[in-house]
Image (tube, grey):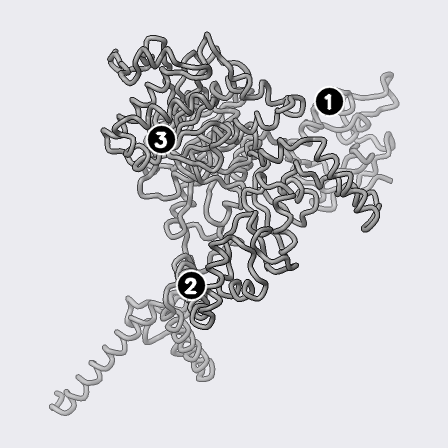
Amino acid sequence: MLNNNEFLKSSHKLISLREDIEYLNFNLKKYPKYLLNAKIDLSKFSSILNNDFIDMNEEIYNKLIRYFSIQNKIQSNFNNIPETNFLYQNKKLQNLVTTQMTYIMDGRLIKFYNDNKSDAKTLRGIIRKKKRFPRNEFIKLKEAFPCILAGIRDYAEYIPLEPEIFDLIIIDESSQVSIAQAFPALLRAKKVLILGDNKQFSNVKSAQARTTTNITYRNNLKNSFIQNVSNEPAKLERLDKFNIKTSILDFFGFIANYQVQLKKHFRGYKEIISYSNKFFYQDNLEVMKIRGKTINDVIKFSFINDEFEVDDKKDNEEITFPFFSSEDISKVSHNTNINEVNFIISELKKMKDSNSDLSVGIITPHTNQQKILMEKISKLPERDYFFEKLHLKIMTFDTCQGEERDIIFYSMVATEKMDRLWGVFIKNLADIDVDEEGKIKAQRLNVGFSRAKECIHFVLSKSLDKYDGSIGGALRHYKNILDESKKEKSVSEVDKNSKMEPVVMNWFYQTKFWNTKKDNIVFKPQFEIGKYLKQLDKTYKHPNYKVDFLLVYKDISGNEHKIIIEYDGFKEHFTNIDEVNEFNYQHYYNNEDVYREKVLEGYGYKFIRINKFNIGNNPIENLNLRIENIIKPRQLNNQILSNIHNTIEGIQNGDMKECPKCKSVKPIEQFKDDSLITGYGRFCIDCKNIAGTSKQKYKKCPKCGSPMILRKGRYGKFYGCSRYPYCKGTRPYY
């Protein structure tokens, strides 16, 4: 029997032991490998009292405890590090830099006004009178305004002629700036950045400059250059580009230190920019804008007949146009089309009725059509809504550069009886250098058909096959794009919770692979491949997998390629994300993804996994290359199969023969027997045990000890193991 004191002591010991066990149970679970090595089973009380940890000497025990202590401390410190978001932090830094820059610039302006009030008033008067800035006052103005927006002429007319007065001068739309216009700005710059597109309009006035006057100026410049600078052929060749008709963009193309094409296109959908991309930029543009609506809302065709009716009217509803009297029609001049004007006005009224706020532009090839559109729309009671709410702009193909609108109507004017488009557009794009005005006529197409952001609406008065030349090709191109785009899946079919799946689908539809092979391609987003496989294979016991995209392509040989394209979100598809980078991400896919990929590969599907690490600088080209590599036929590089092929070929050529006794295929020399008339026996010399009939030395295989036979390879004779291909031992032939 225990007395009270002993009972209390024992109780305290048990309670303390229980607390120790609970502590061990809670903490040791963090180290499962150690528990296994130390032979500790937490479910068995005896292993806690009797294990390798208990038998450990004091020095090792102290080191282990110190290791656990340091590990807990490091882990605790890392856990206390706040989670970082690069995009958020980057945006925050950008906002701080912008705020600081604004503060500095505002401070300069206030300081300039407070310290130089009289100078500020003087400069205001100079600006109003459009006079040249005095040098000292301009330096003060530049310090107050470190970034100055100015027209190209302002450098010559107002800014002092001082070399390198600006650290950097940026000239935008440089294809429209001639060398003569840019020269005053260039003289005042330390560095120059030229932005422009030589596929768009150049300076019209410079292009129309008199040739004789231009030649006179160039000859004078050349003589002066030879006398005062140099007569080296290389420098004279560059001087030849110093032409009043040459834009500053073309000129700097010969002398620039660095050039780059800006490929990303943000304005419109790929279908809208498709003509320019194909015929002017060689399909190098990467369209970033994703189409979230049907193609019928992006490309529209309306065909007008002679009775003021629209061929594509709905429900056979007759559309009348009460905007013109018979007197108006009788006054119609050349290069106008009243029917198209009527139709466009009716469309504008529909937009007003629906309270639309999309901006609208009208582009026509003829100035007379532009004038009559402007005149008739200006007389309508809705004119203020059209020009103010819809920001309506009526333009020709020559005047639309720099004018972008959500919706662009194209009034092409031409009818079967009257068509003067041949004078506006080039007949054949291949004849740009042959046609006298070929470059400008081609640029009209590029500029005119790249103005829309949301919709292009062609208003035509004859069928597409009746349009000739490059303009006919352009119109038929858009009709083909309209038809072909209906084969594409809608962005609404992808996973609504994924921000990247619509982007990946947009990339795919811009690849060369899709655009050249679409007739042989089936492309399905969010394909339920698990259900599909269950229908084909009753033994399929895996989950009902769903893949981002299934691509099925049948090549010219009739082979079917089944490819799964997946975009792997960083948090959803990777483990230990703190350790993942572009060099090791393949090893950190979660187990479910790896298992799913292996299962589907077992059914013949190939995978293309896309993530932020392998997307590349050009996602479209990258995706196209990966698809092409998968479907590319490959030659088998299998040594066993290669040897089998060589053996079959040797038997067919008579260089090898099968021994019916040992069932081995051996070189014909192994059957040589001088005692026979033919010189060769039926059985090999190993089976006949004939010595000296060949140069066989009966060597043993250095790997397995089996007999070796004389063989012939690409480098001559050698001894090979008779158990080949199961043993590949060899010896040289002497």
The residue identified by callout 2 is 102
Marks counted in the figure total: 3
Q: Where is residue 342 in the image (x, y as percent from the top left)?
A: 33, 18
Q: Where is residue 439 in the image (x, y as percent from the top left)?
A: 61, 28
The answer to whether any part of residue 541 appears in the image is no
Q: Tag 3: Cα neighbours inside 10 Å, few (<14), some, or many (≥20)?
A: some
Q: Is mark 3 on a helix, strand or loop?
A: loop
The answer to whether any part of residue 257 appears in the image is yes
Give the residue drawn at x 17%, y 84%.
11
From the viewer's side, name the closer residue of 652 and 624.
Answer: 624
Give the residue drawn at x 42%, y 71%.
114
Q: What element carries label 2?
A: helix
The residue identified by callout 1 is 651
From the viewer's side, name the closer residue of 39 and 328.
Answer: 328
Q: Where is residue 65 in the image (x, y as percent from the top left)?
A: 41, 79
Q: Position of residue 584 (x, y in %)?
A: 51, 54
Q: Tag 1: Cα neighbours inside 10 Å, few (<14), some, or many (≥20)?
A: some
Answer with left or right where residue 396 lies relative to residue 305.
right
Q: Image quarter for residue 354?
A: top left
The residue identified by callout 3 is 490
Q: Distance between the residues labelled 2 and 3?
A: 44 Å
The amino acid beneath tag 1 is: Ile
The amino acid beneath tag 2 is: Thr
From the viewer's side, name the closer residue of 639 and 73.
Answer: 73
Q: Image quarter for residue 270?
A: top left
Q: Distance between the residues labelled 2 and 1?
A: 86 Å
Mark 2 or 3 closer to N-term?
A: 2
